Image (cartoon, coloured by chain):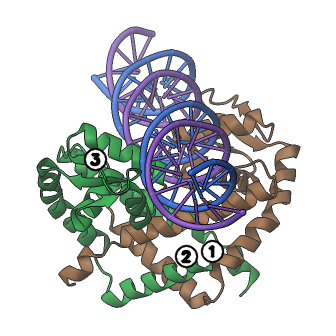
Chain colours: A brown, B green, C blue, D purple
Amino acid sequence: MTDTFVSNPSFFKLDATLKRIRNYWQKTFDAHKKDITVDQWLLIENLYKHKKITHNELARVTSKDITTVSRIIELLVKKELVIREGSTHDRRKVFLQLTTKGSDKYKDVRPLVLEMRKTGWAGLTENDYAELTRILDVIYNNIP
Amino acid sequence: MTDTFVSNPSFFKLDATLKRIRNYWQKTFDAHKKDITVDQWLLIENLYKHKKITHNELARVTSKDITTVSRIIELLVKKELVIREGSTHDRRKVFLQLTTKGSDKYKDVRPLVLEMRKTGWAGLTENDYAELTRILDVIYNNIP
DNA sequence: TTATTTTAGTTGCTAAAGCAACTATTGCTA
DNA sequence: TAGCAATAGTTGCTTTAGCAACTAAAATAA
């Protein structure tokens, strides 16, 4: 691998792309008055998928810090989209679940998300997707 | 493009990879007591490259919000790594430059950064790099 | 020239990231 | 069983992201 290669700012490009996507998603949510942030959406999506899950597990599946999850959940509870329910077997644990309002929010926002994903991937093939996935996985696993 | 494809959480993978890289960089900076954050490094790198540049231009080349740049620069000025110098021709503009201490910081940290880039790219080829760049560029330009 | 618009930058606000320190449990071990 | 370690979660703190509102200066239009 050449020096030029190593000095290329790939990290920067990842960051720029992600910020652009994030910005687009947020602006779309706002334009449609979904009253939700991108990361709040990510948690809702995973709560819908996993039904009942603890802060810790939610942090793991979303690649978020548990403190961050704790605070986002706090906001979602205030919005009445999520309920916390203490475990009886292990009183340290708190199970999280979408409320009916939370499930409705998921179903309401999901079509927008699918549209935006389609937009982002326009002009790319399934092979491109596989390549991106492969490369990112290698990088991810290279990090100690 | 299939539905399965569109519903794949590519955004999430980008985010997870970037967070992992960022985390690794920060921990490495901390372990070597560089007293700097990843984004502060990014600004220093660009100030070294561009010599003399305004907040606005720096925001553009780093894909950062100008308010974010303004605040990071504030921290760098406090650390005496950067000086602000008002333009005489256009008194709205403020030129930014690394101090000697700032240049020294750049030279001090740069080898670490090169090492980390090498680590991240281990096992990948120049073609992989080109592919990643191509795909990210397409996505970037797909976003309205 | 005066009035309006555009540009450069800062400040206030909310949200998210992540470390450190803390409480409260539970599990382990001597 | 008592003591200690590990686990789950929250709170405090600093940093970054980005929108809105603001000041100040420059550019453009009337």
Residue A106: x and y, percent?
80, 55
Q: Secondary structure at mark 3?
A: strand
Q: Secondary structure at mark 2?
A: helix
Q: Is residue D1 above or below residue B113?
A: above
Q: Which residue is mark 3?
A: B84
Q: Which residue is mark 1?
A: B143
- Residue A14: mark in rendering: none
Instruction: Bin the neighbour count of mark 2 within 10 Å (Cα to Cα): few under 14, some 14-19, many 20 and up.
Output: many
- Residue B140: mark in rendering: 2
Q: Is residue A144 visible?
A: no
Residue B103: x and y, percent?
14, 55
As drawn, is D1 to the left or to the right of A91? left
Which chain is home to disc 3? B
Q: Look at the image and tell me in which quarter the C terminus of chain A lies.
A: bottom left
What is the three-letter code of the residue carrying label 1? Ile
Q: Is residue A22 above or below residue A114?
A: above
Residue at left offset 43%, top offset 82%: B133
- Give the mark toward the camera: 3 or 1: 3
Residue at left offset 70%, top offset 28%: A88
Q: Could you tell me how far apart the alpha carbons at marks 2 and 3 are, in whole angstroms?
A: 32 Å
2 or 3: tag closer to the N-terminus? 3
Q: Could you tell me how far apart the alpha carbons at marks 3 and 1 are, in whole angstroms?
A: 34 Å
- State yes or no: discs 2 and 3 in contact (Cβ < 8 Å): no
**Among the 4 quarters of the image, the one containing residue B124:** bottom left
- State yes or no: discs 1 and 2 in contact (Cβ < 8 Å): yes
